[in-house]
Amino acid sequence: MEETQRRVKDAVDDLIDDLDRKFLREKQRKAFLCSAKCCESTGSRATIEKCVDSCNKSMQKSHTLLETELSALQQQMSRCAMGCYDKQMGPDPSKYSEAQMHQFNEKIDSCVSRCADDHISVLPKIKSRLSNSLKD
């Protein structure tokens, strides 16, 4: 199970790192520069805060978009894993012998690993959707 979690985490980390390099860093840089210009103003504190908030809107939108996609992926993976458990559930597992419990756990691990593979294979589509949305 740990290997499966590591594979999913690595794949998602690679996706985020790639999007960060291609889109998010530049958006963040622009937001920082814009915010710095706001602070050069002699206007009121409220005016400066409004200016800084305006500078950060694009970055906030991008983060929300990324979080929404990753949350949906996590929910789908959780449902798949629960489906694995439900499929393998027989009589009360607390009454399983050690051998039955070992077999039960192996079947669940195998099923969850397939869920992970299925969801990792969807990451390029998610990346494409996010890339299209993150372009300025």
Image (cartoon, grey):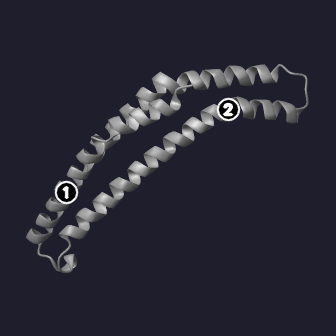
Give the secondary structure at mark 2: helix
Looking at the image, residue 62 sits to the left or right of residue 47; the answer is left
Looking at the image, residue 25 sits to the left or right of residue 130; the answer is right
For image coordinates 39% across by 39% down, the residue present is 126
Give the secondary structure at mark 1: helix
First in residue order: circle 2 vs circle 1: 2
Can you tell which quarter of the image residue 47 is in? top right
In depth, the one of 126 and 44 nearer the eye is: 126
For image coordinates 11% across by 65% down, the residue present is 103
Q: Residues within 10 Å of mark 1 (few under 14, many from 20)?
A: some
What residue is disc 1 on?
111
| The label number, if any, that marks residue 56 in the structure image | 2
Q: Amino acid at mark 1?
A: Cys
For image coordinates 36% across by 54% down, the residue present is 76
For image coordinates 75% across by 30% down, the residue present is 52
Q: How many marks?
A: 2
**Which residue lies most toward the left here?**
99
Can you tell which quarter of the image residue 50 is in? top right
Q: Quadrant of the C terminus?
A: top right
Looking at the image, residue 133 sits to the left or right of residue 78; the answer is right
In this rendering, the answer to whether 136 lies above or below 9 is above
Residue 94 placement (x, y as % from top left): 21, 78
Residue 123 placement (x, y as % from top left): 34, 39
Q: Amino acid at mark 2?
A: Asn
Residue 134 placement (x, y as % from top left): 52, 30
Q: Are marks 2 and 1 in contact (CB under 8 Å)?
A: no
In this rendering, the answer to whether 9 lies above or below 89 is above
